[in-house]
Image: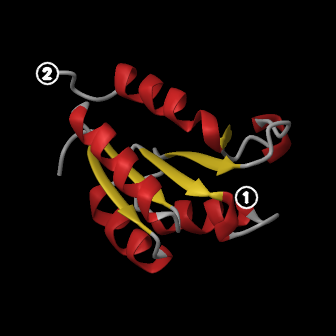
Amino acid sequence: MAEHVVFLLDNDKDFLNLYSKLLQSKGCQVFATDNLFLLLKYAKTALPEWIFIDENFAPEHEKELVKIIDKSLPVHHTHFAVMGERRGKTSADTDQGFEFVYKPAVLEKMMEITKNSCNLH
């Protein structure tokens, strides 16, 4: 597996396709899915650096979903970002278990990640 792995969990196939290609073009290895089971299965061996999760997978229970995924990983070095439609929500609202990213601004966060993490060759 590549050194910098990003996972995307979202039901929006167009979003997954667009952002997967964007991250891959910046040198990241990407696993994009709308299936939580597959994410859990592959995250155990790929050890993603970041996992972006659409908040609609567990409305109002994002923290619990992040805990479930994190506990399934053999090493706990993964960063989590929950993508949501509510602009006013902040990472402080999540009790520091993950970052909250306003979904229309996800591109900015991903570019920050690629700048800091992925190979830009």
Real-space Cα separation, disc 2 to disc 1, in angstroms: 35 Å
The residue that appears at 49% across and 74% down in the rendered structure is 36
Residue 46 image-quadrant placement: bottom left
Q: The disc labelled 1 sits on which kind of residue?
A: Lys
Q: Is residue 23 visible?
A: yes
Q: Is 36 on the left-hand or right-hand side of 65? A: left
Other residues around mark 1 within 10 Å, as few (<14) / some (14–19) / many (≥20)? some
Q: Could you tell which of marks 2 and 1 lies nearer the N-terminus? A: 1
According to the picture, the residue beneath numbered tag 2 turns out to be 121
Residue 67 image-quadrant placement: bottom right
Query: Disc 2, disc 1: CB below 8 Å?
Result: no
The residue that appears at 48% across and 69% down in the rendered structure is 72
Other residues around mark 2 within 10 Å, as few (<14) / some (14–19) / many (≥20)? few
Q: The disc labelled 2 sits on which kind of residue?
A: His
Question: In the rendered image of this protein, does residue 73 appear above or below residue 120?
Answer: below
Residue 25 image-quadrant placement: top left
According to the picture, the residue beneath numbered tag 1 turns out to be 63
Mark identifier at residue 20:
none
Q: Is 118 on the left-hand or right-hand side of 106? A: left
Question: In the rendered image of this protein, does residue 106 appear above or below residue 74?
Answer: above
Q: Secondary structure at mark 1?
A: helix
User: In x, y percent, where is residue 54?
Assistant: 61, 58
User: In x, y percent, where is residue 38?
Assistant: 38, 76
Q: Nearer the viewer, mark 2 or mark 1?
A: 2
Q: Secondary structure at mark 2?
A: loop
Q: Is 83 on the left-hand or right-hand side of 28? A: right
The quadrant of the picture occupied by the C terminus is top left
The residue that appears at 85% across and 36% down in the rendered structure is 88
